Image (cartoon, rainbow, N blue to C red):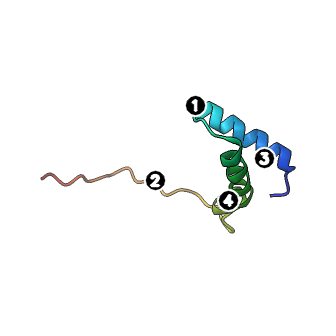
Amino acid sequence: MSADPQDVGVRVRSLLAAAGLPAGEREIAGLVAAYAVQRPAVDALFDVPDTADARPVLLREVVVPRD
């Protein structure tokens, strides 16, 4: 992630506030460092090559086994 560290700090504080989670400055600093590393890794999970033209397989007949 090449975002400005200040932007990452704002994002982390916003996420904490939205979740209603309290955090001290030391915890926030750790979360900012972790977020800066983990966010690109999570984004990469959705970067699957050769799927731009893929179509989903839709099954109309679904069989649910009865117990």
Give the label on residue 20, or none: 1
Amino acid type for the residue under numbered disc 1: Gly
Question: Secondary structure under badge 1?
Answer: loop
Instruction: State which tag comes first along the sequence, 3 or 1.
Output: 3
Image coords of residue 25 (percent x, y): 71, 43
The single residue placed furthest to the bottom in the displayed view is: 50
In the image, farthest residue toward the left: 67
Using the numbered discs, state the Cα–Cα distance from disc 2 to disc 1 in whole angstroms: 40 Å
Mark 3, residue position: 8
Q: Is mark 3 on a helix, strand or loop?
A: helix
Q: Identify the element where label 2 is drawn.
A: loop
* Residue type highlighted by circle 3: Val
Q: How crowded is mark 2: few (under 14 residues within 10 Å), some or many (20 or more)?
A: few
Name the residue that disc number 4 marks. 38
Which residue type carries mark 4? Gln
Q: Earlier in the sequence, mark 3 or mark 2?
A: 3
Nearer the observer, 31 or 45: 31
Image quadrant assignment for residue 16: top right
Residue 58, which numbered label?
2
The image position of residue 29, as x and y in percent, is 73, 49
Q: Which residue is drawn at 85% across and 52% down?
A: 3
Q: Upstream in the sequence, badge 4 or badge 1?
A: 1
Closer to the camera, 12 or 40? 12
